[in-house]
Amino acid sequence: MRRPTFTVVVVAAVAAALTGCATGGAAPGASGTGAPVPELSPDQQVDIVFESYNLQQAGLWSDTINGLVADFEAQHPNIHVKAQPPQGSGTAGAGTASSVQTQMLAGSPPDVAQLTFDTLDFAVNELGAQSLDGLFGAEAVDATFSGEHPFHPRAATLGDWDGETYGIPYVFSTPTLFYNATALTKAGLPADADLSTWPKVAAAAKAVTAATGKPALSVSCSVKGGNWCMQALFRSAGGDVLSQDRKTIEFGEPGAVSAVTALRQMYDDGVLANLDSTTQYESFAKGDVAIQLQTSALQGMFMKSAATGGWDLRAAPMPAFEGHAAVPTNSGSALFTFSQDPAKQRASWEFIKFMTSDHAYTEISSKIGYLPLRPSLTEDPASLKEWADNNPLLAPNLGQLDTLEAWESYPGNSYVQADDILGQAVEDAVYYGKDPAATLQAAQQRVQELIQ
C-alpha cells in the first residue's frame, strides 16, 4: 500500500528532461528492464562508496558511522564499503550535492550519498538519483519502512518525489526551544515557565534581560544557514516559501512577513541577540544566552555544558504564534543511490536498509543524539528505552514528529542562491533596520526570477 504524503508534487516531463541533463545523471529509476534489480549471490563480491557529511565531524559522529559500516560489512562479507566525507571544501547542505555533482561529472559518483533535504529537487531532477521504487519495487520499499519498529509516517515520505521514493530518510532534527531554567529562576520566573507561544517567550526573555543586562534570546532560524528552521516559523505564522505547485515563491507574503516582523520586534525590544550561527550555540552553552531555538541535534553538547556549568537545561517544543499552531519542519538528510551497475545498486540498497534499521537508529540516537525515526525504539528495553528514559529533553523533539512538515527544496539549479537571498533578507529585516515587508518582497521577486 502506498505510503501517505502530505504535499502533492507535480513534475512535468521529468524523465525526458533528465536523459540528457548537463550534470551527467541518468533517468531516475532506470534499471533497464522494469524488473527489480537481482539479488546478489552469497559469494558475489561488490565494492561501493558511501559519502556522508557526518564523517566530516570527528569524535562521536564519525566513530558511530564508521562503527555501523563495520557492523554492516560483518553481516555482509561480500559487500565492501568505502566510507568518505564529501569531497572538496563543501559542508552539510549545498556542499553535499555539489560533491556528488563533481564526482558525477568525473564519471565516478558515490554509490550511496547522504544529501540534505533542501537538495531533493536537484538530486532527483539534475543529479539523477535513482528511484528506489523503480529499482526494487514499491513493496520492498514499503517493507523497509515497516517492521517491528516502523518509521514515523511523517518521516517516511520526506524522500518521496512525484509519488515514488528516491531517498530513505536517515537523520534529522526539529527546532527545539532549549532554555536555562537556572537563569529563569534568578530572574523571578518559574523553572517550568510556559514558553508555548512567542509572546510568552518574549516576556520571559525580557525578564531575564532585565536581570542580566544582555539579550537573553537567540533564534538560529534568523541567520544564514537557518532557513530550514525559518520555514517552520513561516508556516507557523500562516506563510510558506513555495506554492504547492512549486512555481511561485511565497516568502514575501503576509504570513511569512509577520514571522520576521515578530523577530524584528524582539530585537528592537533588546531581548534578541544578533549573533551568527556558531556564536549562537556557543553563547547558549556558556550560559550567556538563556533561551535558544536551535536544532535538537545540539542537545548532547548542551547537556555537557549544563553539567559542567552547573545550570539546569530544559527543552520545550517550538513556540507558536498567537492564533496559529506551531508547524515544525525537519533538518537533516536522506540516503540516495546513484549507482548504474545492478550489482552496486543491490549492494547499495542493502546498505541503505541497514543504515536505517533498528540497530542503526539505536546506535545513532544513543551515541550522536539524532531523533530516532523509528519512534517505538524508545519503548523497547533492548534498544532505546533506557536512553529515552534518561533523556527527558527528547520528548519535545519526538513529539513534534506528529505535526512535522517537510523542509522544502527550491526548484532548479539555483537553490543555494535562493537560500542565500532569503537568509540575507531575514538578517537585514531582523537586525539591520530594513523594512520586513519590502525586504522580503524584493527577495521573493529575485528568487522567483531564478526559478523561472
Image: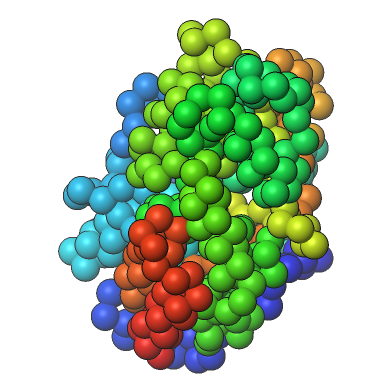
x 30%, y 55%: residue: 95
Q: Please determine whether, in this image, residue 315 is positioned above or below residue 438.
A: above
Q: Quadrant of the N terminus?
A: bottom right
x 35%, y 44%: residue: 276
Can you give x and y, in whole percent of width and height, for residue 205 in the image?
60, 36
- Quadrant in the rendering for residue 286: top left
Q: Is residue 180 left or right of residue 113?
A: right
Q: Is residue 126 left or right of residue 13?
A: left
Give the number of marks. 0
Q: Of residues 133 and 248, which is closer to you in this image? A: 248
Residue 340 seen in render: no
x 50%, y 91%: residue: 13
- Quadrant in the rendering for residue 125: bottom left
Can you give x and y, in whole percent of width and height, for residue 351 in the image?
50, 43
Q: Of residues 329 and 431, which is closer to you in this image? A: 431
Can you give x and y, in whole percent of width and height, for residue 218 in the image?
50, 41
Q: Please determine whether, in this image, residue 17 is positioned above or below residue 270.
A: below
Q: Is residue 390 left or right of residue 335?
A: right
- Quadrant in the rendering for residue 338: bottom left
x 72%, y 25%: residue: 189
Q: Of residues 42 and 361, which is closer to you in this image? A: 361
